[in-house]
Amino acid sequence: MIGVARLLTSRCLKWATVTSFIFSIVLVTHLLHPFKPFADQMVINTNWSRFAYAQYVTNSEYLCNSVMLFEALQHLRSRADRVMIYPSHMLASDHKSSNARLLAKARDKYDVKLVPITVRHKDNTDPTWADSLTKLLLFNQTQYSRILYIDSDSVLLESMDELFFLPSIPVAMPRAYWLFPMKEILSTMLMLIEPSEVEFARIMSEMDAASSNDYDMEIINSLYRNNAMVLPHRRYALLTGEFRSESHAKYLGSEIEPWDPARAYSEAKLVHFSDWPLPKPWLHMDEELRLALQPNCTNTTGGAADCTARIIWNSFYKDFQMKRKEICS
């Protein structure tokens, strides 16, 4: 009996050891790849019609930009819906106009759902921002549980479908990192929105009470700056102007991390054109001004010139102009 007991004890110990070893492997695998099976299953079972990428359009220039973004989403095989809110007169006025042609192209070629609206215009103000409040009408698109808005003066490098699965919150945005610490606000260049009648009513109330100097960013920050989810700007809100900057501490969030333009580019999913005093990429840029303000080359430790930042920066503008001609001409 003692021999049998010892044998059973020995087998139990061996089984316990094997079980412990298997559990350790499973645990390590789970820690190295957290939630991947669940995430994969969640994507497979997703009703993508609940989510949408959205654009707002107020004039011909931004209509073209928006169609370019929708083309990029199709190329990147994003699975969410695509929605454009636009002035109703654009399609009704002349079906042969360039505006009507681009709207039809967005609808027929890129599967964009067109939603006519009345533009929210502010008189006696900077024309650049006069219609920017229109984007806030997206909070009222309650046919969707989540909308991802992207400023159309941007380049989309990768799909951002993963953002639709973030925890529930009225809005998520990146920091306007280039303004920190003097002005600690969030940027409306990218907004993950949960459309809601309640939130839209709050926004409309804030819009009605806004001063002549209050635009979309001021209104959104007034309501959500202290309770919005913050998206990482290094992945979702890189400015083209960062490649021209002499200091990158605001972008890197560190005074000691070295700046690597190639890495910044490879990390980014969205790049926003912002290079004051240079114009937006669809406007004429004086060649002398471009050459004077393009990123500087740096010297490597071996003494060779490193022009990576300059090459990347110029490619943003060149590629945008080529794509614009291809899609909108």
Image (spheres, rainbow, N blue to C red):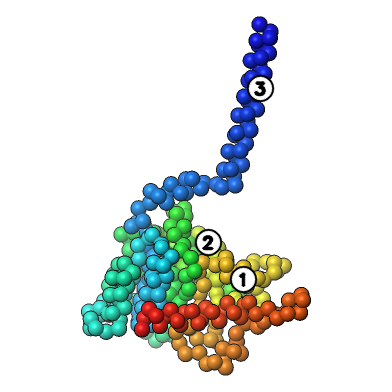
> For the residue carrying disc 3, how many other residues have a C-alpha within 10 Å: few (<14), some (14-19), or many (20+)?
few
Pointer 2 residue: 230
Q: Quadrant of residue 182?
A: bottom right
Q: Position of residue 126 (x, y in %)?
A: 43, 85
Say left or right for 197 vs 127: left
Residue 251 visible, this angle: no
Q: Residue at x 55, y 74 (%)?
A: 239
Q: Which mark is residue 13?
A: 3
- Residue drawn 28% across and 70% down? 108
Q: Quadrant of the N terminus?
A: top right
Amino acid of disc 1: Ala
Disc 3, SS: helix
Q: Position of residue 316 (x, y in %)?
A: 52, 78
Mark with earlier residue (2, 3)? 3
The numbered mark at residue 262 is 1
Mark closer to the observer (2, 3): 3
Label 1 crowd bin: few (<14), some (14–19), many (20+), radius 10 Å: few
